[in-house]
Image (cartoon, rainbow, N blue to C red):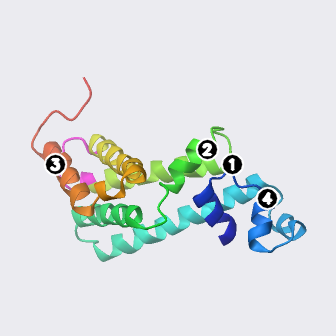
C-alpha cells in the first residue's frame, strides 16, 4: 500500500497503473489482487489511509490546544504550511483525488469530499467558540484560504507560510467578531 500511495501522490492516480505499482513494489499482480480486488479498491484504501492520518494529526493538535479554539485553528494552518514546504509536495492529496476522479460516486471521491466537509464542520465548531456572528461563513472563508494555499503551494511553495495563513485567518475571524458583513447578499 505504501508504494501505491507514494506513486499515486507523486505520479498521479490515473497515471499510475497496476503494472507500475507491481514493478516498483516487487509484489506480484496476483498478490496485489488478493488484497485489493481492483485498482479502484486500492485508490479507496489510499484515500482512507490519508484521511486517517489527517484526522490523527488533527486530533493530536486539538488535544494539545484543547483550551484554545484559535490555537487549534492555527495549529491546523501551520500543518498546511509544513505540508506545502516538504520537498516532495505535489498538492493536497484529497484535492488531487477529487480532480482526478470526477465520478462523485467513487468511494475514494466520497472519502475526499467527506474529509473536506468534516474539516469545514470542525472549523465551524471552533469558530463558534470565538464569538463570531456567523461561524459557517468563517469556516467557508478559512476553507477557501486552506484550499487556496494548497493550490498556491503547488505553484510556488515559498508563497505559503504558517504566519501568512494565520494572519489571513485572524483577519477573517476579526471580521466575524466585529460585525463586518459576513453573509452573502
- The residue sitting at 69% across, 56% down in the picture is 43
- Per the image, the residue denoted by label 3 is 171
* Front: mark 2 or 3: 2
Task: Using the numbered discs, state the Cα–Cα distance from disc 1 to disc 3 in whole angstroms.
Answer: 39 Å
Write down the region rendered in magenta. 127-135
Mark 2 lies on a secondary structure that is helix
Task: Using the numbered discs, state the Cα–Cα distance from disc 2 to disc 3 in whole angstroms.
Answer: 33 Å
Pointer 4 local density, CA inside 10 Å: few below 14, some 14–19, many at least 20: some
| Residue 159 visible in this rendered orientation of the protein | yes
**Magenta span contains residue 131:** yes
Where is residue 103 drawn, in percent x and y? 66, 38
Where is residue 11 drawn, in percent x and y? 62, 56
Main secondary structure found in the magenta portion: loop
Query: Which of the two labelled residues, at mark 4 and mark 3, occupies the earlier sequence position?
Result: 4
Q: Are marks 4 and 3 in contact (CB under 8 Å)?
A: no
Query: Which of the two labelled residues, at mark 4 and mark 2, occupies the earlier sequence position?
Result: 4
Amino acid at each position: 500500500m505504501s508504494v501505491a500511495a507514494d506513486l499515486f501522490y507523486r505520479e498521479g492516480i490515473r497515471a499510475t497503473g497496476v503494472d507500475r505499482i507491481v514493478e516498483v513494489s516487487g509484489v506480484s499482480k496476483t498478490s496485489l489482487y488478493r488484497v485489493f480486488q481492483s485498482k479502484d479498491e486500492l485508490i479507496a484504501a489510499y484515500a482512507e489511509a490519508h484521511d486517517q492520518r489527517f484526522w490523527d494529526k488533527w486530533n493530536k493538535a486539538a488535544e494539545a490546544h484543547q483550551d484554545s479554539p484559535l490555537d487549534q485553528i492555527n495549529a491546523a494552518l501551520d500543518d498546511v504550511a509544513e505540508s506545502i514546504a516538504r520537498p516532495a509536495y505535489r498538492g493536497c492529496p484529497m484535492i488531487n483525488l477529487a480532480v482526478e476522479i470526477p465520478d462523485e460516486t467513487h468511494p475514494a471521491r466520497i472519502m475526499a469530499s467527506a474529509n473536506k466537509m468534516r474539516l469545514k464542520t470542525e472549523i465551524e465548531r471552533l469558530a463558534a467558540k470565538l464569538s463570531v456572528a456567523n461561524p459557517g461563513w468563517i469556516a467557508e472563508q478559512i476553507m477557501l484560504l486552506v484550499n487556496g494555499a494548497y493550490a498556491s503551494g503547488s505553484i510556488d511553495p515559498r508563497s505559503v507560510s504558517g504566519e501568512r495563513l494565520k494572519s489571513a485567518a485572524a483577519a477573517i475571524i476579526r471580521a466575524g467578531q466585529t460585525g463586518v458583513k459576513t453573509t452573502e447578499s
